[in-house]
Image (spheres, grey):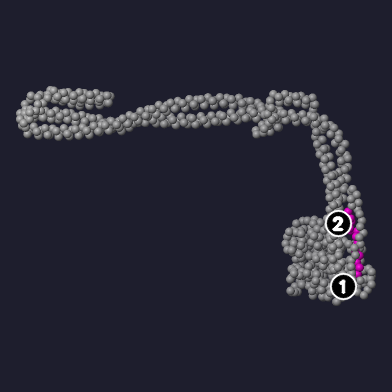
C-alpha cells in the first residue's frame, strides 16, 4: 500500500486545484519524494493538508484558531474561497488496508459555514470510520506517520504519560484502544439506561399488580368464552361440514346420473338413426331384374317344352308310321302306351301350371298360364289326332329323313331346355337369397325396436331419479343457507373460518349434547356479567411495558457484563501487542541510536502506573492510559542519566533515532517528514540518508527538506513557490533514478 496521489483544493495557500503524483515502488523499494522551497512558500501547509485529511481535530496543531482559518482567505489579487478539500489516493493492491478495493480515496471537505464531511471512495462516512481504517492500516495523522516541525523535540520534552500516547499508535494498539474506548462509552451509556429502566420498573410495578388483581376475576370469563367458542366451532363446524358433505355427494350423484342420461340418450339416437336407415332402405331394381330374367327363362323354357312336345309327338308318330308300313320290320305300336304317355305329359303340364301359380302369387301369371294352356291344347290335339290306323303309305326314305330331322330337333330342344333349367335354378337361388336377407333385416328391425323401447324406459327412469335428487338438493340447500345464517349471527367474524374450513376435521360428537353444553356456558357468562373494556385494553399494554423493561434491564446487565469481558480481552491484546512491539522498538531504537551517534546506547522504559475504574457490580477494567514511557539515551563517551541533560542537537538526533525505530517496526504505508533533518550536520545527514534508504524497503517517504544529502536520495523532487497572489504552486522534477 502506498500514497499514489494527493489532491488539494482551497486548503490554506493552495487556492487552485493542486495535484501531487507520487511514483510507484521500484524494484520492491518504495519511493522517496522530496519537497523543497523557500520559507513561507507553503511547504508546511502541504503536511498540514495531509494531517487534516486524515482526521486531525486540533486547530492548534494546524496553526489555526477557527475552522475557517484552513480555507484560503484570499489576497489582493484573488478573492477568498468557501470550500477546502483534500483527497488522498491510495494504491491498495497488496490489501494492506482492510477495504475490498485495489484503490481507494480518503477525502475531507469543509465549508466556510462550518459544515464538514468525510468520504471514503466518495461515500460519506464518520470520522471514526476513517480513524479505524487508518489504525488497522498502521497509520495515523499523529505520531510517527507524520512528523512535523517541533515533534522531534516534543517527544523528548513531553511527560512520560504523553509519550505513552505516541507509543500507543507506534505499537499498533490504537485500533484496540478505539474499540476499548467505545466499549467504555457503551458501558457508561448502558449504566445510565439501566438506572432509568429500574426507575421505570419501580413506578410501573404497583399499577401492574392492581391491574393483575382486576384481570384475574376475568380469567374465568375468558376461559368460558374460549370453551364456548371451541364448542360452537365444533358444533357449527360439524353440522356445516356434515350438511356440506351431503350437498357435495348429492351434486356428484346428480352429475353422475346426468352423464349416464346423456350416454343413454346418445345410444338411443344412434339406434334410431340406424333403424330409420334400415326402414327407408330400398331394395333397388336388382331383385326385379333377376325376377324378370327368371320369368323370361321360364317362358322360353315353356316354349321349348311346347316345341319339344310337338317334336316328340311327331317323332313318335313317324316312327309308328315307319313300323306300320315297313315291309322289313314287323312293328306294332301300342296305342295304349302312347296315349298313356300323352296323358302323363298333360298331367305334368297341369301340375306345372299349379306350381307357377303358387310361385308368383298372380304376378305375370296370366301370361305364363296362357303359354302353358297353349302347350296343353297342343298335347290334347295330338291325343285326338293320334290314330294308329292312318295312312301309312309314304315313302320309306322320306320317313327316315324326317325322323332324323325330328330327332335332331328333339336333341336341340333338350339341350336348350337343360340350359334354361340351369338358368332358372340360378335365378331361383338368387331370389331365395334376397328373400333371406329381407327376412334378416326385418328381424334386425324388430330387435332395434325392442332396444329402443328398453333405452327409452331407462331414460325415463334416470330422469325420474335426477328430478328426485334435485328436489333433495333444493331442500338441503335451504337447510344449508339457514345454518350459515345462524353461524354468521353466533360466530361473527369467525364464521368465515368455520364455513370455509371444508377440510378441517372437527371433533364429531352428538349435536344435542353440544347444544346443551353451549346453553350452559352462555348462562354462566350471563351470571359473570360484562367486563370493563378499559381494563382489558390497559392490562396488555402495562404488562408488555413491564416485560419490556424487565427484558431491557436484563439485557443491559448482560451487555455490561459482555462489554467488560470485551474490555478485558482488548486489554490483554493491548498489553501483549504493546509489550511485543515495544520490545522490538526498543531494540531498533538502540540500533539506530548507535548508527546516528556512532556508538553509545539508548532504550525506552515502560512505567506501569495502573489505576482501576469502578463499574457496576464491583467489576473493573484497567486503564492503561495511566502508564508512562521513560527515554534513556547515553551518547558515546558521556554519562547521562536522563534526556533532559542532552544538548539540543543530541535531543534531535535521539528523537530521530526513536522515530526511525518506530517506522522500522510498524512499517506504515507512507511517512511524512517535515524538516526533521534541519539540525543535522553533514556527517549525520549522510547517516540519515542511509537510514531512509534502509527504511524505504517497507514505507514510502515524503520529505520536506533543505538538506542536500536528503534531496540527492529522492526519486522525485517537487519545488514549492508562492507568487504575489499568495497562492502556493508546485513544480515537479523526476530525477530518473532506477
| Residue 475, horizontal then vertical, whole percent | 60, 24
- Seen in the picture, residue 647 relative to 376 is either above or below; the reply is below
Quarter holding the N terminus is bottom right
Q: Which class describes the residues within 10 Å of circle 2: few (<14), some (14-19), or many (20+)?
A: many
Towards the viewer: 683 or 142:
683
Q: Is residue 141 visible?
A: yes
Q: Residue sitting at 42 percent across and 31 percent down?
A: 273
Q: Which residue is mark 1?
A: 594
Towards the viewer: 491 or 732:
491
Circle 1 SS class: helix
Q: Which residues are magenta?
A: 621-633
Q: Which residue is mark 2?
A: 571
Quarter holding the C terminus is bottom right
Q: Is residue 80 visible?
A: no
Q: Residue sitting at 12 percent across and 24 percent down?
A: 335
Does the magenta portion include 93? Answer: no
Residue 520 location, quadrant: top right
Does the magenta portion include 630? Answer: yes
- Seen in the picture, residue 709 relative to 340 is either above or below; the reply is below
Amino acid at each position: 500500500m502506498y500514497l499514489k496521489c494527493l489532491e488539494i483544493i482551497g486548503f490554506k495557500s493552495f487556492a487552485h486545484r493542486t495535484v501531487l503524483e507520487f511514483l510507484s515502488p521500484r524494484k520492491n523499494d518504495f519511493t522517496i519524494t522530496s519537497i523543497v522551497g523557500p520559507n513561507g512558500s507553503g511547504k508546511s501547509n502541504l503536511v498540514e493538508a495531509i494531517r487534516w485529511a486524515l482526521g486531525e481535530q486540533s486547530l492548534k496543531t494546524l496553526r489555526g484558531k477557527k475552522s475557517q482559518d484552513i480555507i484560503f482567505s484570499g489576497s489582493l489579487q484573488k478573492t477568498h474561497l468557501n470550500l477546502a478539500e483534500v483527497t488522498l489516493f491510495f494504491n491498495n493492491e497488496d490489501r494492506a488496508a482492510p477495504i475490498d478495493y485495489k484503490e481507494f480515496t480518503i477525502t475531507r471537505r469543509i465549508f466556510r459555514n462550518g459544515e464538514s464531511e468525510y468520504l471514503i471512495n466518495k461515500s460519506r462516512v464518520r470520522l471514526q470510520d476513517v480513524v479505524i481504517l487508518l489504525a488497522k492500516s498502521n497509520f495515523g495523522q499523529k505520531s510517527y506517520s507524520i512528523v512535523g516541525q517541533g515533534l522531534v523535540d516534543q517527544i523528548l520534552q513531553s511527560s512520560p504519560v504523553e509519550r505513552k500516547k505516541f507509543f500507543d499508535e507506534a505499537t499498533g494498539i490504537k485500533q484496540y484502544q478505539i474499540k476499548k474506548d467505545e466499549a467504555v462509552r457503551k458501558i457508561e451509556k448502558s449504566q445510565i439506561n439501566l438506572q432509568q429502566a429500574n426507575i421505570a420498573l419501580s413506578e410501573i410495578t404497583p399499577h401492574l399488580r392492581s391491574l393483575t388483581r382486576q384481570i384475574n376475576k376475568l380469567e374465568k370469563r375468558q376461559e368460558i368464552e374460549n370453551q364456548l367458542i371451541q364448542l360452537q366451532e365444533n358444533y357449527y363446524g360439524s353440522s356445516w361440514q356434515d350438511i356440506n358433505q351431503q350437498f357435495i355427494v348429492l351434486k356428484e350423484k346428480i352429475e353422475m346420473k346426468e352423464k349416464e342420461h346423456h350416454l343413454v340418450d346418445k345410444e338411443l339416437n344412434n339406434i334410431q338413426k340406424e333403424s330409420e336407415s334400415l326402414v327407408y332402405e330400398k331394395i333397388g331394381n336388382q331383385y326385379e331384374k333377376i325376377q324378370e330374367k327368371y320369368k323370361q327363362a321360364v317362358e322360353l323354357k315353356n316354349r321349348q317344352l311346347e316345341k319339344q312336345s310337338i317334336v316328340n309327338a311327331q317323332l313318335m308318330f313317324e316312327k309308328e308310321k315307319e313300323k306300320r308300313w315297313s315291309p322289313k320290320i314287323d312293328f306294332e305300336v301300342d296305342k295304349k302306351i302312347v296315349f298313356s304317355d300323352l296323358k302323363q305329359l298333360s298331367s305334368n303340364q297341369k301340375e306345372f301350371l299349379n306350381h307357377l301359380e303358387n310361385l308368383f302369387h298372380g304376378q305375370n301369371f296370366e301370361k305364363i298360364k296362357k303359354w302353358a294352356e297353349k302347350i296343353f291344347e297342343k298335347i290334347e290335339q295330338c291325343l285326338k289326332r293320334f290314330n294308329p290306323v292312318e295312312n301309312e303309305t309314304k315313302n320309306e326314305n322320306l320317313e327316315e329323313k324326317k325322323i332324323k330331322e325330328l330327332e335332331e330337333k328333339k336333341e336341340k330342344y333338350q339341350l336348350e331346355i337343360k340350359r334354361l333349367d340351369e338358368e332358372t335354378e340360378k335365378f331361383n337361388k338368387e331370389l331365395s337369397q334376397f328373400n333371406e336377407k329381407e327376412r334378416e333385416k326385418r328381424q334386425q328391425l324388430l330387435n332395434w325396436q325392442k332396444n329402443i323401447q328398453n333405452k327409452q324406459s331407462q331414460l325415463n327412469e334416470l330422469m325420474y331419479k335426477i328430478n328426485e335428487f334435485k328436489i333433495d338438493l333444493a331442500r338441503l340447500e335451504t337447510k344449508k343457507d339457514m345454518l350459515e345464517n345462524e353461524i354468521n349471527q353466533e360466530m361473527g367474524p369467525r364464521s368465515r373460518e368455520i364455513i370455509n374450513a371444508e377440510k378441517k376435521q372437527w371433533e364429531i360428537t352428538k349435536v344435542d349434547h353440544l347444544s346443551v353444553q353451549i346453553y350452559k356456558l352462555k348462562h354462566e357468562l350471563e351470571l359473570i356479567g360484562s367486563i370493563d373494556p378499559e381494563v382489558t385494553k390497559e392490562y396488555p399494554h402495562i404488562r408488555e411495558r413491564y416485560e419490556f423493561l424487565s427484558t431491557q434491564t436484563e439485557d443491559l446487565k448482560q451487555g455490561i457484563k459482555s462489554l467488560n469481558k470485551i474490555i478485558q480481552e482488548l486489554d490483554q491484546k493491548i498489553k501483549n501487542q504493546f509489550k511485543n512491539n515495544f520490545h522490538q522498538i526498543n531494540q531498533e531504537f538502540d540500533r539506530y541510536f548507535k548508527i546516528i551517534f556512532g556508538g553509545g546506547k539508548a532504550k525506552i522504559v515502560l512505567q506501569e502506573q495502573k489505576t482501576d475504574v469502578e463499574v457496576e457490580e464491583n467489576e473493573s477494567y484497567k486503564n492503561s492510559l495511566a502508564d508512562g514511557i521513560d527515554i534513556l539515551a547515553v551518547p558515546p563517551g558521556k554519562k547521562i542519566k536522563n534526556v533532559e541533560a542532552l544538548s539540543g542537537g543530541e535531543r534531535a538526533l535521539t528523537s530521530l533515532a526513536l522515530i526511525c525505530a518506530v517506522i522500522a517496526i510498524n512499517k506504515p504505508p507512507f511517512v511524512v517528514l517535515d524538516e526533521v533533518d534541519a539540525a543535522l550536520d553533514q556527517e549525520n545527514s549522510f547517516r540519515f540518508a542511509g537510514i531512509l534508504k534502509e527504511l524505504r524497503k517497507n514505507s514510502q517517504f515524503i520529505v520536506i527538506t533543505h538538506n542536500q544529502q536528503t534531496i540527492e536520495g529522492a526519486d522525485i523532487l517537487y519545488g514549492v513557490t508562492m507568487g504575489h497572489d499568495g497562492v502556493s504552486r508546485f513544480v515537479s522534477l523526476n530525477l530518473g533514478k532506477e
